[in-house]
Image (tube, rainbow, N blue to C red):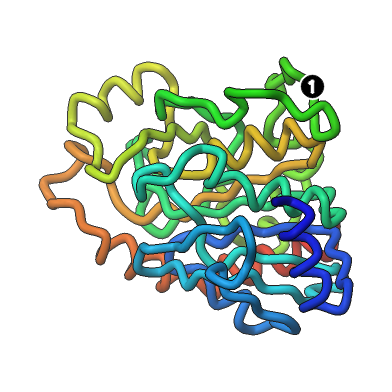
Amino acid sequence: MMNDTLDYIQEYTDSFEPEVGIILGSGLGNLASLYKEYTIPYTDIPGFVSSTIEGHSGNLVFGNISGKRVVMMQGRFHYYEGYSMEEITYPIKVMKNLGVKTLILTNAAGIVNKSFRPGDLMVITDHINMLGNNPLIGKNDDKLGPRFPDMSEVYNKDLIKIADEVARLLKINLKHGVYIASSGPSYETPAEIRMARIIGADAAGMSTVPEAIVGNYCSMKVLGISCLTNFASGISSKKLSHQEVMETAVSVNKQFRQLLIEILKKI
């Protein structure tokens, strides 16, 4: 299947060779629209599944940003959509085979750390996998990575330093924190969020961790950035909704986009 995927993409894009891969989370997909040179719907790509969630357009977009050749996922696949871990992370393996060496993961996340506020941006320093699954389970592909990959630095420290430098220049108060992923699609309960805080989480979501695991396994440098869209369950009396997530993500879209553009200049 991988050969079919690569053949289709390379024929469609005139053998465009990306060096950076970006996954654009909920409400953040317009960066791809601004820099597109080639756009392929996921439904046309052999081996890809469909993105079914509002705010995830479902396109693989190729373009040049800040002098870097970039492939962008305009929306991702989620475990809660009923897809397997293999299906969710297949695009990361495709990116690796296309030549991508740096992977930037973005998402919308709920606030666990009470000192953070909706609209803040947070660079991910580490993660906690509460999905109850791991994308590396099954037969190992030794061409991609080792059977037992080290996970002591999933999120590259040099890339985090670059993100911090750029944020200072842009006067963005970039937070640092640990991201905890659960399967969803239901939001976490107040008790689950209290547990998340006790074990060291700062933000909660339903994505990113499988992609980060596979990116690290494939020897990519990984950077993760969360748009903190709402207080997680139990922190405020407000009921949670995907609409609120989308609205907050859109409201900070310009700032987030500027941060990514400037980071790409320094990679």
Seen in the image, is 264 located left or right of residue 241?
right
Which one is in front, 186 or 84? 84
Which one is in front, 173 or 190? 190
Residue at x 53%, y 46% (from the top left corner):
88
Where is residue 158, by image quadrant?
Answer: top right
**Element carrying mark 1:** loop
Where is residue 147, by image quadrant?
Answer: top right
What residue does disc 1 label?
146
Identify whether 68 is placed above or below 124.
below
Seen in the image, is 216 located left or right of residue 187?
right
x then y, percent, for residue 65: 78, 74
The kind of residue tagged 1 is: Pro
Residue 110 visible (yes or no): no
Residue at x 17%, y 44% (from the top left corner):
236
Seen in the image, is 179 located left or right of residue 19?
left
Which one is in front, 176 or 53? 53
Residue at x 63%, y 33% (from the top left corner):
213
